[in-house]
Each structure stands twice: as C-alpha cells, then as structure tokens.
Image: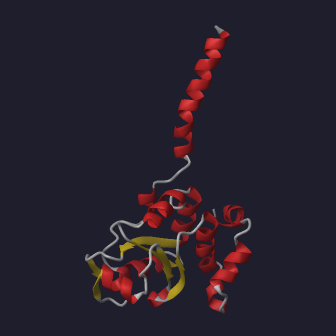
Amino acid sequence: MNRLLCTLTITLVAALMPFSASAERADPEAFYQIPAFGDFQTNLEKALSEGKKGVLLYFHQDQCPFCKQMERRVFTQPIVHEFFHKHFDIYKVNIKGNKEFVDFKGEPVAQSDFAVRHRARATPTLIIFGENGEELVRFVSNPSLEEMLALGKFVVDGAYQDGTDFFNYKRAASNGIEQEIREQNL
C-alpha cells in the first residue's frame, strides 16, 4: 500500500510540474502594448508623461525563427515584463507589414517603410526611442535574458547620455544584472 501511495504521489508531482513552471512564465503576447498601430508620436509623449524613459520597438517578421525563439525564451520571463513595463511602453512592428500608423514625427507611414527608415532590416531588432523619437539604443539579434535586461538598464541608468557604448556597458553589466534589477527596480 505504501509503495502504491508513493508511486501515485510521485506521478502526481511529476504531472503538476509543467503547470508550476508555466505559472512562472509570462505570456509573450502580453509583452506588447495593444493596439500597436495607432500614433507613435502620441504613444511616446504619453509614455514620457507617465515618467517612463521611452518606447521599445520590437521589429520582427512572421517567419523569423530567431524572433520566435526570443519570444519564447526572453519575453516569457516575468522580470523582463516587470522591468520593461515599468520603464517603457513596448510595441511590435512587422518589417514586411503594410499596416499604416503615425510615426514619431506625426507622419503616416507603413510598417515596412518605417522599418527601412530606422535601418531595421534584420530581425529581431530592438530599438528604444526617447524624447522626440530619438534612438537611444539598438540591439540586432536574439538577446539572452541578461542582454535584454542590460538593454533596458542602459537607458534607465542614462548610460547612453555620456557616450558609453552599449556593448561595453553590456559586457560590464551583464554579470549579476538580474539580481541587481530585482533589488533596485522591482
């Protein structure tokens, strides 16, 4: 009887483990603001008026395996959601898309033209824009959790203002950045 009870307990625990692991993950689609296509000029002004540092634009394309991997591996991390939503509004832009929206200068533009204007040809590309739609930092590739956090912290810390190179900053900041963000920002 004890053997049966032990076997049932182990089976139950093993069956429930995926649910507890998924509970610690965030929905990657909840990472972006909705609706994403409206007026980036107004969205940026709103974010800044709320005390945020700017907007993060995630340039992607539908068939990009690196985008899908980043969405599953990085955008599902609760610390990424919490940190980025605290400091930025986040929008997703399809570099092949034809939907129109208003850019940071108040001009109507299609997604694909906007991506070309901002040199977002490879995906994924992450760009944080600040006041007046100024590009503060860019990351082209599939970031690790630490690189993603360093990208946001680079802007939050104001490191871009003194001419610090993001890749040098990232190299120095990546070690222990997750714990530091938990302690200081969340």
Position above or below: 44 against 81: below
Q: Is residue 115 visible?
A: yes
Q: Is residue 158 visible?
A: no
Q: Quadrant of residue 77?
A: bottom right
- Furthest-top residue in this view: 1
Q: Position of residue 45 (x, y in %)?
A: 42, 82
Position above or below: 39 against 73: below
Position above or below: 18 against 40: above
Q: Quadrant of the C terminus?
A: bottom right
Q: Position of residue 67 (x, y in %)?
A: 45, 66
User: Does residue 171 appear to the left or right of 32 in the view shown?
Assistant: right
The image shows a total of numbered marks equal to 0
User: Does residue 165 appear to the left or right of 98 in the view shown?
Assistant: right
User: Does residue 44 appear to the left or right of 106 in the view shown?
Assistant: right
Q: Position of residue 22 (x, y in %)?
A: 52, 45
117 or 90: nearer the viewer = 117
Residue drawn at the location 30% of the way across and 76% of the way down: 38
161 or 112: nearer the viewer = 112
Residue drawn at the location 49% of the way across and 57% of the way down: 72
The type of colouring in the image is secondary structure
168 or 180: nearer the viewer = 168
Residue drawn at the location 56% of the way across and 40% of the way down: 20
Q: Quadrant of the N terminus?
A: top right
